[in-house]
Image: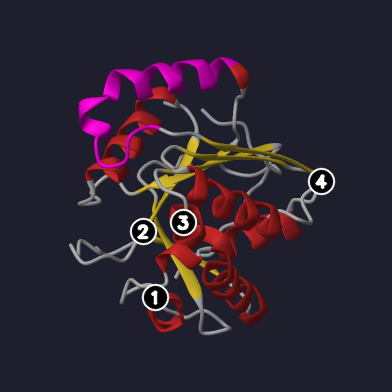
Amino acid sequence: MLNLSLANAPKTILLLGAHCDDIEIGCAATVLYLIDNFPDAHFEWIVFSSSPARAQEATRSANRLLASAISKNVLIENFRNGYFPYIGEQIKDYFESLKTRISPDFILTHHLDDRHQDHRILAELTWNTFRDHFIMEYEIPKYDGGLRTPNCFIPVTQESADKKISTLMDCFVSEATKSWFSPETFKAMLRLRGVESNSPTGLAEAYYCRKISLHPLNRATK
């Protein structure tokens, strides 16, 4: 396992989720890790589809996870759930507007090969819009399956894992009736990826990282 660290502290971190609980499921523990390690970073948190009730849940959850961040902006939009491929022009316009407003150093978004159409479209537009940025794609367990073999892992502490799970269960009460939406599901994902990455805590979140350029330290690149 090759261990690398970010040479430059990210100033702006962009978090993208198609639905209200996606960011939390995919990368909540990583968000806590980023806040601890890059305390001066600004967090831009954007959810693209919601209902009024779900928006309240998502806002509460985001503010809970970002409570220690020095700077944050939480946006809950209302693009039509399940229809992202058919309203792609509207979402594309949103991305075009977004890139004029912020220039993120680090982006967390959905996996490009996710079987959920909304997730997949969001990932495609992330890459289409931010072509020269550091992007990591998170994963969402679901009935449709589709989990792959990730190539990037972030070990997380037990405290961060517990906060991720408690936030999901406390804030998203509208999801409680779904059989898969349970502490056991989220613990299993963290534990499985912890095993695969030989995490010192036994816990990790996993990502798909498609492009990384490694530059020698203290040496001019040719």
* Foreground tag (3 vs 2): 3
- In the rendering, which numbered label is found on residue 189? 1
**Which of the two labelled residues, at mark 3 and mark 4, occupies the earlier sequence position?**
3
The residue identified by callout 4 is 70
Q: Are marks 4 and 1 in contact (CB under 8 Å)?
A: no
- Distance Cα–Cα, label 2 vs label 1: 10 Å
Q: Closest to the observer: 70 or 198?
A: 70
The residue identified by callout 2 is 139
Q: Secondary structure at mark 1?
A: helix
* Foreground tag (3 vs 4): 3
Q: Secondary structure at mark 3?
A: loop
Residue 179 at x, y percent in the picture: 31, 77
Residue sitting at x 56%, y 61%: 28
Q: Secondary structure at mark 2?
A: loop
Residue 162 highlighted magenta (yes or no): no
The residue identified by callout 3 is 21
**Which of the two labelled residues, at mark 3 and mark 1, occupies the earlier sequence position?**
3
Circle 2 packing at 10 Å, graded few (<14), some (14-19), many (20+), is many
Q: Amino acid at mark 4?
A: Ile
Q: Closest to the observer: 196 or 113?
A: 113
Does the image show residue 62?
yes
Residue 98 highlighted magenta (yes or no): yes
Position of 16 with respect to 115 (left or right) is: right
**Which of the two labelled residues, at mark 2 and mark 4, occupies the earlier sequence position?**
4
Furthest residue toward front: 53
Boundaries of the magenta span: 79-100
Image quadrant assignment for residue 200: bottom right
